[in-house]
Amino acid sequence: MTKGAKLSLLMISFTFLLMAAFMSGMIKSEHWEISNIVVDAEFKRVNSEQIRLTVATNKQRSFFKLNANKIRDNLMQIPWVSDISVTKKWPNTLRIKLKEHKAVAVWNEQKLLNNNGDIFEVDSLEDLSSLPHFKSKTNNSKIVWSKYMRFNDIIKNIGFEITACEISTIGSWNIELNNGINIIIGSDYQDAKLVRLAETWESLLNTNETLPSYIDLRYTNGYAVKWQKKYKQFEKLNHSDKTKLELTKIQEYGNSNG
C-alpha cells in the first residue's frame, strides 16, 4: 500500500471516529429531548389530558432513544381509541394522529360496536342508551352489523327503524322496531322476507285499525300477524303473485320454516 493510500485510509478512519463520537454526544445530550407534542384528533371521547398523561409515563425523552411504537401501544389502551400513529419529527417533535371509535350499537349490554363492525369496550355506557341494542350469541360482529344495515334500510321504507336485535347461534334474527313491533325473521331468506313485508305493508294496515304488535316472517308464502290488544286473533297474509293479496284469518300458527 502506498503512503498516499495509507494516509487516505487514516483520514477516513479518523473522520468515522469523529462522527461516531459526535453522534454519541448527540444521543446523550439533553439538548435533543422531545419538547413538543402535536396531536391530530377529533377529541369527542378522548381528551388531550389523557394523551399527555399517557405520553408522560414514558421516562425516555431523548429524540433518538424514545420508542414511538411503545408510546403507540400505551395510547391504544385509552378507551375509545380506534387507531393511532406516532412519529418523531426532527429535532424535538412527537406527532400523534388519533382516530376514535364511532359507536353504532350496544353489544350484549356490556360492550359497543363501531361503524366497522368491531367490538370494543369503554368505561361506561350510561349516555349511549339511545343506540340500537344487539344481543348476539355469535361473535361474527361484522356480519351482524352488515345485516343490520341492510335490514334497517328495508324497514325504513315503511317509516320505522330497528332499535333492538336478538341473534341466535344459528343466525336466526328477532328484531324490535322503534314503534314497539316485534318481528321474527328467522335464519333463511331474511332480506327477501323483509322486502315482502315492506311491499305488503300498506295492504296489511288497511285490514285493521291498529298496528301489529308481533309479526312472524318464518313462512314460505306469507307471514303471521298478532294485532295489538283490540284485536286478539292472528292473521296470515298470503300472496300467490305480486298483484293479488288475500288476507286469511287463522287462530293459531301453522308450521313455520326458519
Image (cartoon, rainbow, N blue to C red):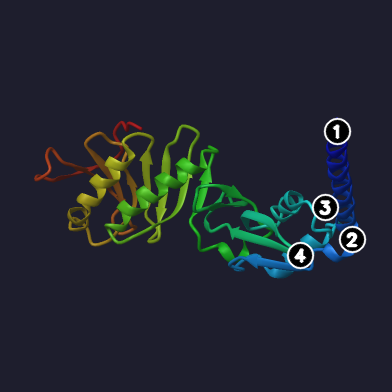
- Considering only order in the chain, which callout, 1 or 4, is on the residue closer to the N terminus? 1
CA gap, disc 3 and disc 2: 11 Å
**Secondary structure at numbered mark 4:** loop
Q: Which residue is mark 4?
A: 92
Q: Which residue is mark 3?
A: 65
In the foreground, 65 or 70: 65
**Secondary structure at numbered mark 1:** loop
- Residue 252, image x and y in percent? 30, 39
Nearer the camera: disc 3 or disc 1: 1
Q: Position of 3 compared to 84: left or right? A: right
CA gap, disc 4 and disc 3: 12 Å
- Residue 13, image x and y in percent? 87, 42
CA gap, disc 2 and disc 4: 13 Å
Quadrant, the C terminus: top left
Identified at 37% across, 43% down, the residue is: 184
Q: Which residue is mark 2?
A: 29
Query: Where, by quadrant of the figure, is residue 201 drawn?
Result: bottom left
Quadrant, the N terminus: top right
- Identity, as a three-letter code, of the amino acid under mark 4: Asn
- Residue 42, image x and y in percent? 58, 67
Nearer the camera: disc 3 or disc 2: 2
Q: Is residue 235 visible?
A: no
